[in-house]
Image (spheres, helix red, strand yellow):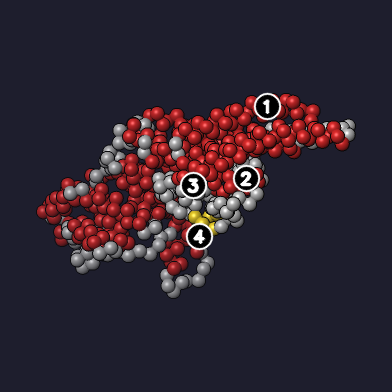
Amino acid sequence: MLREYPGSNFELKARYSLAKFYEKIADFEKSAAMYEDFIAAYDSWAGPKAVGYDNIKELLKKEKEAKDKEAKAAAAAAKGKKPDPKGANATAAAGTSPRWSVGQIAAAPPKEKEKLEAFKKEREELTKEAEKEDWVSAAQFNAGLWWEGLGKSDKAIADYQRYIARFKDKKDVPEIALNIGLIYEKDKKYPEAMKTFDQFLTTYAKDARVKEATRFDLKYRQYLDNKILKNTAEMDKLAKEIVASYPKLTAEDKNSDRAMAGLRAHPLHLLEPTWNQYVGITFKNLKTLKNDLKAKTAKIQDIEKGYLEILQIGNGEYGIAALTRIGLAYGDFSQNFLDSPDPKGLDEDQLSMYRSELENRAFPLEEKALEGLEKALAKSYELSVYNEWTLLAQDKVNKYKPGLYGKVREVAYRGAEFFWEEKLDKTGGSGTVPAPTKEGTPPPAKDGKDVKDAPPSKANTTAAATPAAG
């Protein structure tokens, strides 16, 4: 009908019905294309009276300008090339990709009917029927949904943006605006994702349709995206914002898995500057040894207090990390005594006495280091949680008790059921502590990649081996 009777008043209903039919038989590409054709036909029929026309006319203008620019660029690039018998060059010159369609969209009605008042009245009634049945908003959303499902992100985003602009007062608009950012994130276009999230937080800052938990989650997503891009300054800023915004959540939202995952990710990150300062205090210079010892003694109290506070939160993964760090802190203190240089001018007996005294100072610290590491491993085994901190703790215990743990083998890390397997920031807040050369930094995953924020998954990497016999 669409081919044989262009300009028919049945075009709107025919296109919408076809889109629904293709949807039912799971031909989603044809369905998305037909939904878009329906909207184009409706807009042509309704003109300035179209639903939400005032909201989208600027968007339509920008879209047209962008398409014209792309077409000119494609034409310039194709200039001078030999004709392509398959039409590929012609398509490139037009700035579009070939797509399936049926009939001419919104063709002019037959001349003999164009002037008939009855024909015009029927068309107006059919246009109003499409509006009454809410076909326009449904078609705009469904087109975006199917393009997204087909992996054609640019098309999906364009349709979603039209929906947001045209139906800005609908209840689901903020959710769709947020989804655009998630599409960028899925496509690993992190700058675009963060820009979209920023716009969302600004546009819907006081919108009753958006829960405070959604705003909290977006800040967490931005934190994770900045982590992938190694934007430590933004990470610091967002970590503080997340901690500050947590009290605004409802009691139910505070206890949600997502909120807890967001909150727990940040105390470790916020402690990184303190950790880096602590391990940066060494006993290599005998002239400053007294002051360095005083400074390191004061700083380890801050370290222990900070990680004990993380331990009190109650998350298994971060509890293991906190206990491991406490053990590493005392191990670092002990090793600094043992690595300090010998004073000049001492004879062999005096030097032996001096080194013996250093060992006496180091031994209690070594005992505390071992205690912290063993507590971390005990918690790991109790919860059946195996991660890079477990591996690091085992490695350091092997230093004090050689051979206790066998050779590392390839298995998957195991986290708590709700835990989001995004890697902790092991390079420190300043980004100047390279892994694994700095004491207290777990080894990177085998593939060297960061795990982006995603629903729980089991990434193959290097995990801890079980204790060896004896």
Dots 2, 1 in contact, CB < 8 A:
no
Alpha carbon distance from label 2 to label 4:
63 Å
Q: Residues within 10 Å of mark 1 (few under 14, many from 20)?
A: some
The residue lying at 39 percent from left, 57 percent from top is: 152
The residue lying at 63 percent from left, 28 percent from top is: 299
> Residue 105 placed where, x, y %?
27, 59
In which quadrant will I find the N terminus? Answer: bottom left
Q: Which residue is mark 4?
A: 76
Residue 396's tag is 2
The label nearer to you, 1 versus 3, is 3
**Nearer-N-terminus badge (3/4):** 4
**Nearer-N-terminus badge (1/4):** 4
The label nearer to you, 2 versus 4, is 2
> Residue 450 placed where, x, y %?
53, 49
Q: Which residue is mark 1?
A: 295
Q: Circle 2 — which element?
A: helix
Q: Which residue is mark 3?
A: 381
- Which is nearer the eye, 395 or 352? 352
The residue lying at 65 percent from left, 34 percent from top is: 365
Q: Circle 1 — which element?
A: helix
Alpha carbon distance from label 3 to label 4:
65 Å
The residue lying at 58 percent from left, 38 percent from top is: 371
What residue type is disc 2 on?
Answer: Lys
